[in-house]
Amino acid sequence: MYLFIINPKAGSGRALKVFSDIQNSAVYRQIDSQYFFTEYEGHGEAIARKISAAPEEKTIIVIGGDGTIHEVMNGLTTTDIPLSFIPAGSGNDFARGCGIKGKPEEILREIVEHRKTHPYWIGNYTVDHHAGRKFVNSIGFGFDAAIAHAANQSSYRRFLNAVGLGTLSYVIALIYVLMYYKPMSIELEIDNEKRILKDCWMVTIANHPYYGGGMKIIPNAVIRPNVFPLLIIHSISKWKVLALFMTVFLGIHTRFKEVEILEATTVKLTSKTTIPFQTDGQAGTCRFTSISKQKEAIHITGINEVWAK
C-alpha cells in the first residue's frame, strides 16, 4: 500500500498539480494507494502519527516542500515504514540532500519498481522546556534563523514561489536582515567541551550540505549515523557577510577565516538573551537547545543515485 501525503499549498499550489499529474500516470494506476491532503499547519504530523499506528505493510510518499517532510518526520512514531519525497515546494533541500531527482512520475517509478531503501539519520532537539522534536535538514541559530523568519513573513514569497524563484525570497530576506542584525553571545557545549562565543553570527548543524533552496551551507556534509557537522561564523563585518553568502551556492564560503566547521555527536547551546533559531526553515526563538542524532535510521526510498556514506 502506498500512502500519499500531499500539502496542496506547497510551492504555491505546485504540489497539487504534481499529484494530479501522478494520478494520470500509468505507474499510479497500477498500485494500491490512498492519499491524504494536509489542511492546516501540523496536519502532516497528525496524519503520519495515525499512519504509524496501523501495522500493515506500506510506504509513505510525501508531496510538498521541506516544511511538509518536517511535519511527517515529526509525526512518525516508527522507523519501520519506508518513506519517500516527491519535491514540490520552494526549497526542496531534502530531495537535494538525498539525491532524489527526476520528474515526479520517474521518482514514483523508482519507488515502486526498485523498492531499494537508504538509511537517513535525522536530528533530535529540545528547545527550552518544550518536548523534544526532530529536524530533517538542519537547525540553525542567529543570522540564518532571522533570515528564515523574514522570508516566511514576506509578502513577495508567494509570488516568487509561483514563478519558480522561491530561493530569491531567501536572498532578499538576507539583505533586509543584514541591515539590522546584531551578532549573539552564546555558550556552546560540543561533546561536553564548553566554549564561549562572542559576536557570533550564526551556528548551523546539518544532516547534509543544503539549505535555503540549494545553498551548500556545509559542502562536505554526508548522511551518516551518530555524527553531524557544525558550522560557526565568528565575528565578521556586515559587508563580508554579504560576500560570504554570495559564495554559499558554490560551497566556497568555507575559505573565509571567520568560518569554522567542526564535527559533533552532541551539542548544547545556551544564551542569556532570546535568540532566533530555525529548523528546516521554520523559525522560532529560544535560550537553550540540546541537539543529538536519532540512533535508528529512517528508510528512504526513491533515490536514483548513490550518496557518500
Image: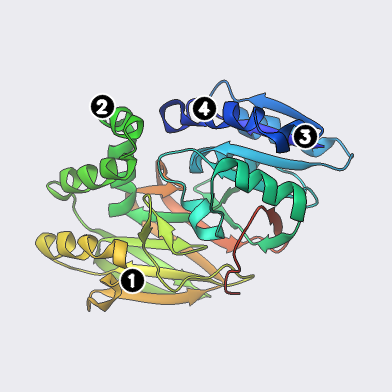
For the residues labelled 2 and 3, say whether their Cβ atoms are less than 8 Å apart: no
Asked which secondary structure carries label 3, the reply is helix
Crowdedness near tag 2: few (<14), some (14–19) or many (≥20) residues, C-alpha within 10 Å: few
Seen in the picture, residue 100 relative to 257 is either above or below; the reply is above
Q: Residue drawn at (10%, 61%), measured in percent from left and top?
A: 239
Crowdedness near tag 3: few (<14), some (14–19) or many (≥20) residues, C-alpha within 10 Å: some
Viewer-nearest of discs 2 and 1: 2
Seen in the picture, residue 224 relative to 211 is either above or below; the reply is below
Can residue 249 be seen here? The reply is: yes
In the image, which disc is placed on residue 239? none
Q: Residue drawn at (64%, 27%), measured in percent from left and top?
A: 24
Q: Residue drawn at (53%, 75%), measured in percent from left and top?
A: 191
Q: Earlier in the sequence, mark 2 or mark 4?
A: 4
The residue that disc 1 covers is 196
Q: Earlier in the sequence, mark 2 or mark 1?
A: 2
Q: Quadrant of the C terminus?
A: bottom right
Name which residue type carries label 1.
Answer: Ile
The residue that disc 3 covers is 51
Q: Earlier in the sequence, mark 3 or mark 1?
A: 3
